[in-house]
Image (cartoon, coloured by chain):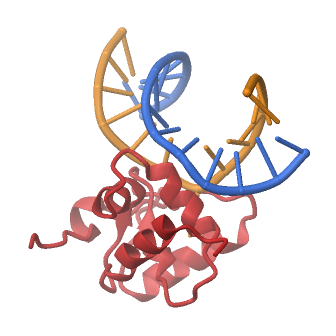
Chain colours: A red, B orange, C blue
Amino acid sequence: MTEPKRNARIYAVVRRIPKGRVATYGQIAELAGLPRQARQVGYALAALRDGRVPWHRVINARGEISPRAEAGPDELQRELLEREGVAFDALGRVSLATHRWQPRLR
DNA sequence: AACATGACCATTA
DNA sequence: GTAATGGCCATGT
């Protein structure tokens, strides 16, 4: 219960991202019903301890892997994405136009 | 309570 | 393309 429901909502959205696709923090925030709260998404993912959530599919609006304090997870994230077929350019960026997850309306 | 920090973003110049 | 600015808000000191 140290965990707010808001986070669970965010995790639920991240879990819907299909393999081989990526989503931005702002996109997740909006889909989770928390518009303009992209930072809270990043915070929620940083606090994440649930291994069922594909956190690596969430990148920033520039198409880059957001740099963390420690350099370890960054490379892991890139490797996981490449393994799913997500391509990075020479500058370490993903083409959002190509790989961005576009959920269908309901 | 104030203040700083953080896996962010859109807008403007 | 870069830089500055405002918005957002949980968490820790």
Rendering coords of residue A43 (x, y %): 58, 59
Residue at image x 62%, y 66%?
A46
How many numbered marks does the figure carry?
0
Q: In this picture, is A33 found above or below B5? A: below
Q: Residue at x 45, y 75 (%)?
A: A11
Q: Position of residue C2 (x, y in %)?
A: 51, 29
Nearer to us in this view, A70 or B3: B3
Residue B2 sits above or below residue A15 on the image: above
Q: Nearer the viewer, residue C10 or A43?
A: C10
Query: Is residue A67 positioned above or below B5 on the image?
Result: below
Q: Nearer the viewer, residue A6 or A95?
A: A6
In the figure, residue A2 lies in which quadrant?
bottom right
Does residue A34 appear left or right of residue C10 in this picture?
Answer: left
Quarter of the picture containing the N terminus of chain A is bottom right
Kindly identify the residue that appears in the image at 32 percent across and 79 percent down. A17
Q: Residue at x 39, y 51 (%)?
A: A61
Q: Report the residue that reaches farthest toward the left.
A: A106
Residue A10, horizontal then vertical, whole percent: 43, 69
In the rendered image, the quadrant that contains the C terminus of chain A is: bottom left
Q: Position of residue C3 (x, y in %)?
A: 55, 22
Residue B9 lies in quadrant: top left
